[in-house]
Amino acid sequence: MHLIRLGAALALAACTTLAAAQGRELPDFTRLVDEQGAAVVNISTTQAPRRGANVPQLPNLEDEEMLEFFRRFIPRQPGPGARPESRSLGSGFLISADGYILTNAHVIDAADEINVKLTDKREYKAKVIGADKRTDVALIKIDAANLPAVRLGDPAKLKVGEWVVAIGSPFGFENTVTAGIVSAKGRSLPQENFVPFIQTDVAINPGNSGGPLFNMKGEVVGVNSQIYSRTGGFMGLSFAIPIDVALDIQKQLRDKGRVSRGRIGVVIQEVTKDLAVSFGLDRPRGALVNAVEKGSPADRGGIEATDIITRFDGKLVESSSDLPRLVGATRPGTSVPVEVWRKAAARTLSLTVGELQEDKVAARSAPRERKPAELAANRLGIAVSELTAEQKRELKLGHGLMVTDVRPDARAEVRRGDILLKMVHNGQHTDLKSNEQLNRLLAGMDKNAVITLQVRRGESTAFVTVTGLADKG
């Protein structure tokens, strides 16, 4: 045991000596904490029990099939019939001397009473100015003056690998300081389309929600929001909302009490390597449009299904996840240029951004089972039939081929009942209208050809890439 401790001490001494030899010192966070710690607050809430309410409980994670998930930092809530409880749910920080506080929307969600405690033990009741669940940002206010406020930084200047510090109340332990580095920037998380998260390895746990993320200058660069975990506790992956995003949201909440976001009315998907080859694009980039809402800003602006949006309002769209953030951050009514890749050539369109309304979930009807037609499978390993006039009226389509049979060795990942609308190969787009036409197109292709099919399934459409065809018969 003594040898192990001695070895650890020698290793630490060696690291310190190496840092000194290279002219660097390990970071000292004491001044940052002394100067900025007083602006961080503890937030607790009181929620009266709702009779008959089904209060959600956190799952027993060890019994879940999918262990890894993104989770909000909310401790277990009291069950139905329990007495009102006041418990530490999260953190926040003062952004002005007159009592405005930024935190997470999920921290104050459904609260009947919000209590704010400062580091000097003063306590206040807070009122909600506004909350935005889409970005998980909330603005609350306490009635006080001459309060300490944080300094705000620029997340764009953050570099991957630099030190950052979090201050908050994990598990109710007030004013806890943890540190780490920026692991990545611009992260997209499931169901979080409007926030380019800052990923860090700063220790974050339940109760840190809504607390500030500081750079080494003592400036707030983010609002701690989520962790990636198998157990519900910290596992080295934490995510913060960039402070510029949070400030834009709080300004709208303060000015209007709500947040307005842009929308253009398209359904998009990621451009894979195979899709890029099919569309004649130099590399995988952009957002592939697989459907355009009729009468939407995109439709009026001339955007078509099969377009790949590569630039929006002068900003590059490297990934499909970039587009919702860029569109959402654009004020409704703004006219913007949109660069698209269409039929192996770039072109620029102009459209006027609309306003995103409340979420609407489109109903998806399952394709009806149809008796397979007596048709031979083609080089895709599927059989198709032409749409009848009645089917075209029912589906509101002018053309398309219905998949009637799928062989076990099929090259295309489609199902019986899917509608093939379009084929893309070497940047050329072809509407599919007959079985003979499809077979003729396939017959002229090399067996290693990469093609893309636009497929309609129920109420949705998507692009399916096929790499390689069966040999010619």
Image (cartoon, helix red, strand yellow):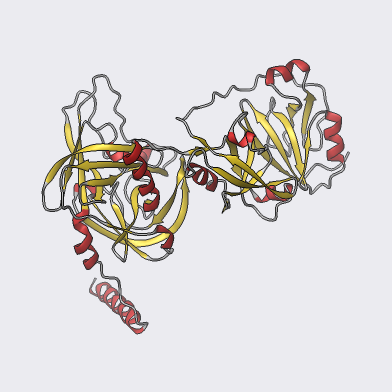
- Please tell me which residue lies in front, 376 or 116: 116
Please tell me whether residue 417 is drawn above or below residue 414 in the rendered image. Answer: above
Seen at 25% across and 41% down, the residue is 140
Most extreme residue toward the top is 390
Q: Tell which residue pokes out farthest to the left in this image.
A: 121
Relative horizontal placement of residue 359, taking residue 264 as reference (left or right): left
In the image, residue 51 lies at what x, y percent? 23, 20
Residue 238 seen in the current view = no
Q: Position of residue 419 (x, y in %)?
A: 71, 28
Front residue of 17/230: it is: 17
Q: Is residue 35 visible?
A: yes
Depth check: 125 or 277 in front? 125
Q: Residue at x 23, y 24 (%)?
A: 80
Q: Position of residue 274 (x, y in %)?
A: 69, 49
Relative to 189, residue 361 above or below: above
Of all residues shown, which one is farthest toward the bottom?
Answer: 21
